[in-house]
Amino acid sequence: MRLGARFPALAAVWIAACVPDFPPPPDSRVETVVDTLHGVAFADDYRWLEDQDAPETRSWITRQNAYAEEIVGESSLRDHFRTRLRELTDRDDVGATRKAGDWEYFTMRRAGEELERIYRRPAAGGDADEPSVDREYDIVLDPVDFDAELRVQLTMMGFSSDGRLMAYSVRQGGADEIAVHIRDLETGEDLPDRLPNALYGGFDWDDDGDGFTYVHRDRYEGPRIRHHVLGTDPGADALIWGEGYPPTTFIGRTEVADGRWVLLNANHGWARQDWFVQDGRTGRIQPIVE
């Protein structure tokens, strides 16, 4: 009993003796913001850190990173994990091919490379071999052209029916938001049309390639399906559907029967869904189930 009573104090002394005398962490400004959700108040002391591009936020991150390096430092254990992670992740990686026009497009990252590039090769048809890391192909998009420090991810979103235009996304530094660019694959240049950094999904080209429909998720107003005509201001894109749905709802769009009909759905969490059908010719939208 006496030993049991003494043990916590002895353990505390032992732990204190083993813990290095680290300096205190950098100060973090506290500015409390209170949100009331369903009648419950939630206090957030660091809401200001959500403004990632603010000079104060960038300074805070720099100081925190420097402090973390001071505490963690270089060690045999850290070197072990670095080596093991490199063994597991630094390998050849070739994505599936996507045919567009007379070409097949795919992503590839060879061992030793930081990020994947987007390549293309002439479409062979039939049972063509998969792209090989041992062969050379035309580079369509290279992350280094967007950021010399390779902090971007490029993703193919869709091709126009004639294979001339490709929509692709640019994700900077692992952010949720992406920017959408349109590349003219014949000239190798981007069109002026560009959707700014935001949350996007459900991208579909028009049959004639003169525009596209997409889902835009706004954190404040909620998700909306919009249509963009090439050569026009994206800020004026037409609203197709979704008005009234809050930011907590996810909406989607699926073309069926070669675009003759369009299925529209709204997901309220994982429990409930609304379904609508849109006439691809008239644009009329009718509910299936709400």
Image: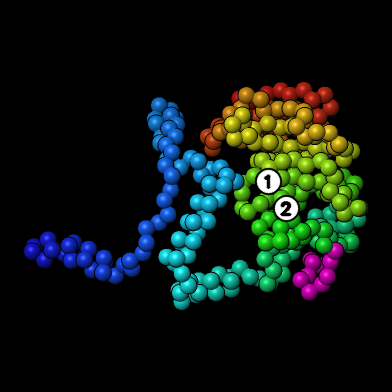
Q: Quadrant of the C terminus?
A: top right
Kindly identify the residue that appears in the image at 77 percent across and 59 percent down. 145
The foreground one among 273 and 93 is 93
Indicate the quadrant containing the N terminus: top left, top right, bottom left or bottom right: bottom left
Chief secondary structure of the magenta portion? loop
Q: Nearer the viewer, residue 264 or 154?
A: 154
Determine the secondary structure under disc 2: strand
Which residue is located at x 13 percent, y 63 percent?
6
Q: As drawn, is 30 to the left or to the right of 256? A: left
**Amino acid type, label 1:** Ile
Viewer-closest of 173 and 263: 173
What x and y, as percent, mark residue 57? 53, 47
Visual colour scheme: rainbow
**Does 221 appear above or below 101?**
above
Q: Is residue 129 magenta?
A: yes
Q: Residues within 10 Å of mark 2 (few under 14, many from 20)?
A: some
Which residue was labeled with disc 2? 155
Give the numbered dot on residue 190. none
Can you name the residue that lies furthest to the bottom here? Answer: 76
Q: Give the magenta-colored segment's residue range.
A: 125-138
- The amino acid type found where label 2 is placed reads Thr
Measured as percent of width and height from the top left, residue 11 is found at 21, 65
Relative to 230, 175 lies left or right? left
User: Of the residues under marks 2 and 1, which one precedes in the sequence?
Assistant: 2
Q: Which picture quadrant has residue 208?
A: top right
Residue 275 placement (x, y as % from top left): 65, 29
Q: Are circles 2 and 1 on residues that touch, CB within 8 Å?
A: yes
Give the image location of residue 25, x and y in percent. 40, 56
Find disc 1 in the rendering and name its residue.
178
Q: Is residue 41 above or below residue 123?
A: above
Examine the rendering and report whether any part of residue 257 can be seen.
no
Few, some or many residues within 10 Å of mark 1 (<14, 14–19, 20+) = many
